[in-house]
Image (spheres, grey):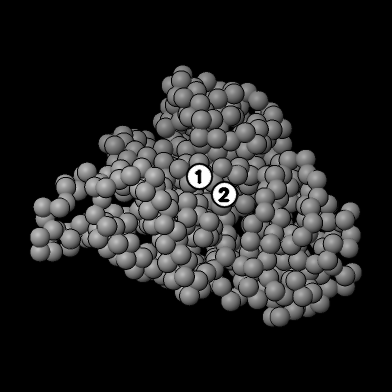
Amino acid sequence: MSREKATSLTLISAITDGALAGVSFYLAYVIKIRLPGELASLGAISEYGWFFLTYLVLLFTSNYFQGFYTFGRTLTNGEIIAGVTKSNGLVMLNLMMVLFVLKVQTLSRLLFVMFAGINIIAGIFGKLFLKAVTGSFQQRGFNTVHALVIGTGEQAREIVAGIRNHPELGYRIVGLLNGDEKPHAEIADVPVLGTSADLHDILVRRRVDEVFYAKPLDDAGRLADMIWACEEIGIRFSLVTDFVRTSIAKSSVRYFLETPLLTFSTTPAAVGQLFIKAVIDRVFAGILLVALSPLLTAIAAAIKLSDGGPVFFTQRRCGLNGRLFTMFKFRTMVERAEQLKEELARYNEMSGPVFKMRNDPRVTRVGRILRRFSLDELPQLYNIFRGEMSFVGPRPPIPEEVERYERWQRRRLSMRPGLTCFWQISGRNEIDFDAWMRLDLKYIDNWSLKLDAIIVGKTIPVVLTGKGAS
């Protein structure tokens, strides 16, 4: 399960726990008030705020240790019922100790017991409902993680069986790699794509989000090469046991069902911040699409009136881990721009696979104004709203450029692409291709919400002055 997905489910689960606890306490309070002779014995519900907040802190802590906020293992219904009951029981026991030590006499014991009983029932149904809903979404293919399994023995078969038996985890098997020199055609109805020596080529040719190493550690040298290949490109690598030293990737221990995994990942591990980043992206993209609609309409009209051609330029781009998506821009070039590109290839001023040219004759008069102030990028707010892009991140390349990347350059695809990044605030077309790639990797290796805020702040004056624009 991806970090963003696990973090989202953790927050949803915690918010649900808090909301259900609030409803349970309110119901317990209302029921007790309506009991004969109980109204006078209760204060205003606001007087119990300290008790409820203490309860929430203990509940979140207890649920965490019960495994309710650790996604990647599937709890059975029986485990959920037992876990919720045990968790709430521990909370209430600890609360009783706190009340005893503090010598609190004002809290109704009956309210305490009623609240505990109602919240246990609500918590069980809440967890079962959340499990059913998330499982349904995963089975329908939402946010699927594409997995490649190295190995064809017992460990690999267990991973395959786990993926098939638990579609709610959101994994899909790309194929298997055999450790032997001669691969089989398929094993357990899963295609064997080659041997472990073919790993790098398969990562380049196919869409893979995670590699599982599920075979005995019989060759530490080859294992290190596999991890480094994934590290270089930015693909997550997980193995069942043992470890290996890496230069960039950070390791973490997690569970896939009942199997312990040591995971190496070069992408940011701040899952909470990544979730906040995704929420901010979509919320602000939606707000800006509405707020800027008059400007977007005016730009569209200007493009249409200038030469009668289409308003938008759409192009297939590579997103997270090479996922293809359609990127939208306002058209700034003549309609035959792509065909004319070959004729202008000798004027390319950018090293590497990217084409950049000052005073490009394909750019229209309206297009020059839009490009100078980056207004042509505004339709990508729709891509951000859809979750295909972010406000800050490496710019999304076209597939033809990615095919010409060196291995280390492919790691820039390991984070969701964005509207702006270090490249935009460092001169854009004034820096060469290798420097551009290294700036993107610098962003990935040092990512934080604070860094995003700094880049956005520095992007605004760059856009207003048109610095580095072609």
Residues 178 and 241: in front is 241
Earlier-in-chain disc, 2 versus 1: 1
Question: x, y (%) of residue 261?
Answer: 69, 59
Q: Which residue is mark 1?
A: 272
The residue at 41%/41% (across/down) is 280
The residue at 31%/36% (across/down) is 292
Residues 36 and 175: in front is 36
Cα–Cα gap, marks 2 and 1: 21 Å
**Quadrant of the image containing the C terminus:** top right
Looking at the image, the residue that sits furthest to the bottom is 188
Dividing the picture into quarters, in which one does residue 53 lie?
Answer: top left
Secondary structure at badge 1 equals: helix
Q: Amino acid at mark 2?
A: Gly
Dividing the picture into quarters, in which one does residue 189 lie?
Answer: bottom right
Q: Nearer the viewer, mark 2 or mark 1?
A: 1
Residues 363 and 48: in front is 48
Left or right position of 79 against 350: left
The residue at 64%/57% (across/down) is 254
Seen in the picture, residue 67 relative to 360 is either above or below; the reply is below
Left or right position of 74 against 158: left
Q: Which residue is mark 2?
A: 319
Q: Amino acid at mark 1?
A: Gly
Q: Is residue 386 visible?
A: no
Crowd rating for badge 1 (residues with CA inside 10 Å; few <14, some 14–19, many 20+): some
Dividing the picture into quarters, in which one does residue 87 lie?
Answer: bottom left
Left or right position of 431 against 80: right
Seen in the picture, residue 102 relative to 199 is either above or below; the reply is above
